[in-house]
Amino acid sequence: MQHFAELLDSLVFQPARNAKLRLITTYLASTPDPDRGYALAALTGTLDLPNAKPALLREFGVQRLGETLFTLSYDYVGDLAETLSLVWDANVKPDAEATGPQAGHNRPPPSLGEVVDRLRLTSKRETPRLIETWLDELDATGRWALIKLVTGALRVGVSARLAKQAAADLGGVSVDDVEEVWHGLKPPYKSLFDWLTKGAPRPAVATTTAVFRPLMLANPLDEAELPSLDPLAYRAEWKWDGIRVQLAAGGEQRRIFTRGGDDATSAFPDIVEAMDFDAVLDGELLVAHPGIGDVGPTIAPFNDLQQRLNRKTITPKMLRDYPAHVRLYDALFLGGEDLRARSFDERRTKLETWFGEKPRGPFDLSPLIRFTTWDELSEMRAGARAAEIEGLMLKRADSAYVAGRPKGPWFKWKRAALTADCVLMYAQRGHGKRSSYYSDYTFGCWRDEELVPVGKAYSGFTDEELLRLDKWVRDHTTNRFGPVREVEPGLVLEIAFDAVQRSTRHKSGIAMRFPRVHRIRWDKPYAEADKLATLEAMLAA
Amino acid sequence: MTADPTPSDPRSWLFTTPQGLYCAPGDFHIDPAWAVKRAVVTHGHGDHARAGHGATLATRETIEIMKVRFGEELGAVQGLRYGETVRIGDVDVRLVPAGHILGSAQIVLDWQGSRIVVSGDFKRRRDPTCPPFEPVKCDVFITEATFALPVFRHPPDSHEIGRLLQSLKTFPERCHLVGVYALGKCQRVIRLLREAGYDKRIWLHGALVSLCDLYTREGVDLGDIAPVGEMGRNPKDDLFGRDVFKGAIVLCPPGALADRWSRRFPDPLPVAASGWMRVRARARQRGAELPLVISDHADWDELCRTIRDVQAPKLWVTHGREDALVHQARSMGVEAEALHVAGREEEGA
């Protein structure tokens, strides 16, 4: 447990992906089974433990420390789990000359495996006592990790995919190989580690279809390459602005996975209810209000979909106001048959047949776009201004469904970005390698005589440009707030973004989707930057 | 401030003035924030030791530190050995180890049978760069309260240094840039590394060099240390200079961690060593990727233990989070109150 706690603690402070991978791989390599397996389960969100409520933690804190000291401490720290972990040994005899993290106790702290096993076997009534005992045995970092474990989310900036990548690195295999076997396995993943580290045979791919299969992803289209591609060899469809999901159902199992393999099933009971099939389907999750008669569903803005994400409890009101919908792109399995080696055209035909068998509730098909020349398609792309369309997808008619992002068979051809000239207002230091550079920029547009912030960007410039931007910020600072500098208006940034949305969180009332620095307009007078009204006119209907 | 000084009323003979804490029967200030005629100084940190006093009394080591920091601006000085007593006016003044940094002292004031101890900054755990805190029984104990909340419980130093050494193993190609205060923390971290068996060269930011030299002269063995100087500054003509810092430990003031100065190092991993690192939000604020909880101030348990050890019926609590400590002391049967002294801020530690 202590070892695992140190890992989580390191991950929290480490912003770089590769460094996180190194930390996890190092941990997995140096930790025995079953602890490392449970750690992997915790990081990938597959560890299902009985939950402790925050109220219990508060009660613990007040019992040990008294109301006054606990409240003062909580006010200062601001996070309940962390406060409790730090104040815990209040009733232990203070011993400043302590030499070990467990000073004052004579029992060794529990291992992660012990924690998991005992939590599973202990009745709900007995769980608080058990947690209390462990809190006594662990050091502050260990307590913090334990509390994270028993209250649910770890929140250490590691996706399920990243954790699996670390496991794959440990065994020198590809992460897609791990994905293929993953959902047939259970914590503590002994057979997985036997395969990765001890030369045991690869675990069998699960036979039920309700497991995650790595998604096939597209590369951005280089328009210069277009003339060399044969338009008749490709199929086109709209790229919908939602969340890519995989629906996997078979037997009693119904699961919804995100692109990274995270399990999102519990957030969308309205979709799960309609998954009365034996199939693995690829589609776009959207919020859509059902159509009537021949009129198809109306896609709601991405903002509405965000109301359904990252929710612990789903209320009937949310289901009513923001009904979920999946627009289907592809079929990986149908009726137990693996279609992934078949061509796109064959899979599409089978998907259409399956879809036509009966009413499919909150599902529809992403329509194919008929075209004969690239110019024709290009025109349609330019004309598509509906908010829910991000651009086009091009898929080779003969392409098999391959995990990952193979070069060639699939392209995404995003709608041309919108741009606006904005004035730099604040700059903030970046993280990791950029910690000595002012690399995160907040910019604004004119509302009458006043600049109002409209967005924030931290990409789109070269290293040389960053050096120059950093110097500009330092030379034009008017105010400092910790890591943030306010600068005098003077520098115009041409910002590219995918869309403009309404937002109640920003003073300007709008928010940009995917803003990035397109060009730095060193020459442009800042008074000539765009007006807020210009952005408001771009608001999706 | 009030009526004539009487020994039975400690507030009447030691009280705060705009310049700082003032001892009336001795006519001197303790750690004054402004220049005064006579100052008694607990230790060399900038918020306690200032230049420009008519006369300064401190430990011999603290005087040496002040000479390095202030040079000519220092007026008349008198350096004492620990335990030595001098009489100033009607007051006997004795300096006793506080265990905070080299030369740090508690000031023991005896006047007509009444004794007040001004702790200055202190800690109770072992520090290889200075003698340990000695509890002195007294009528009034004036304590610091930098980390006076139960959330501050510093782990053992060896554990934290172990985390730094582990990180060097995990990221052997990254330069570990450790933010430390120039006086005390810097030298203590170096000694702790040496005790943990780290014998490679430790590199220093220019601002740390003169105080490290002083510690060495005072007999604290810092091993192989060297200034970074201009090495690696120009990426074009000094590739060698940059490679030297791969997997090396470089110490610098906390402000230099995210300063342009740090760009010369290969993929620097920012480390911060401070008691504030105990709280994750604060560690993140500082941009530390490896926060080490190493403090020169007493933590909550040490503060509580000290209140018991000095057996003072009265406790005055200076700078920090006095609410919690006043509450705690009262529950221990001690008459506790806050004492607001000019010129004290939360930084340091």
Image: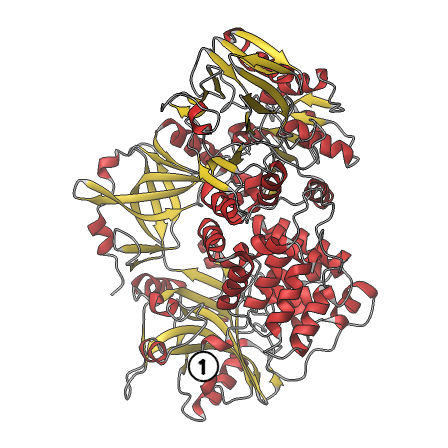
Please tell me in which quadrant of the rendered image residue B309 appears: top right
Q: Nearer the viewer, residue A370 or B83?
A: B83
Q: Point out the image quarter for the C terminus of chain B.
A: top right
**Residue A437 in view:** no
Relative height, residue B179 to residue A126 (above, below): above
Residue at the far bottom: name it: A358
Relative height, residue A60 to residue A315 (above, below): above
Q: Point out the image quarter for the N terminus of chain B.
A: top left
Q: Is residue B186 left or right of residue A241?
A: right
Residue B298 location, x and y as percent? Answer: 59, 38
Q: Is residue B27 left or right of residue B240?
A: left
Residue A235 location, x and y as percent? Answer: 46, 72
**Residue A214 in view:** yes
Q: How many marks?
A: 1
Q: Nearer the viewer, residue A117 or A312?
A: A117
Q: Chain of mark 1?
A: A
Q: Is residue B6 left or right of residue B199?
A: left
Q: Which residue is mark 1?
A: A269
Q: Nearer the viewer, residue A332 or B212?
A: B212
Q: Nearer the viewer, residue A37 or A340?
A: A37
Residue at the far left: name it: A448
Residue A331 location, x and y as percent? Answer: 53, 80
Q: How is the image coloured?
A: secondary structure
- Asked which secondary structure carries label 1, the reply is helix
Please tell me in which quadrant of the rendered image residue A355 appears: bottom left
Residue at the far right: name it: A199
Q: Residue at x 76, y 67 (%)?
A: A193
Dot 1 alpha-carbon crowd within 10 angstroms: few under 14, some 14 to 19, many 20 or more: some
Q: Amino acid at mark 1?
A: Pro
Residue A271 location, x and y as percent? Answer: 44, 81
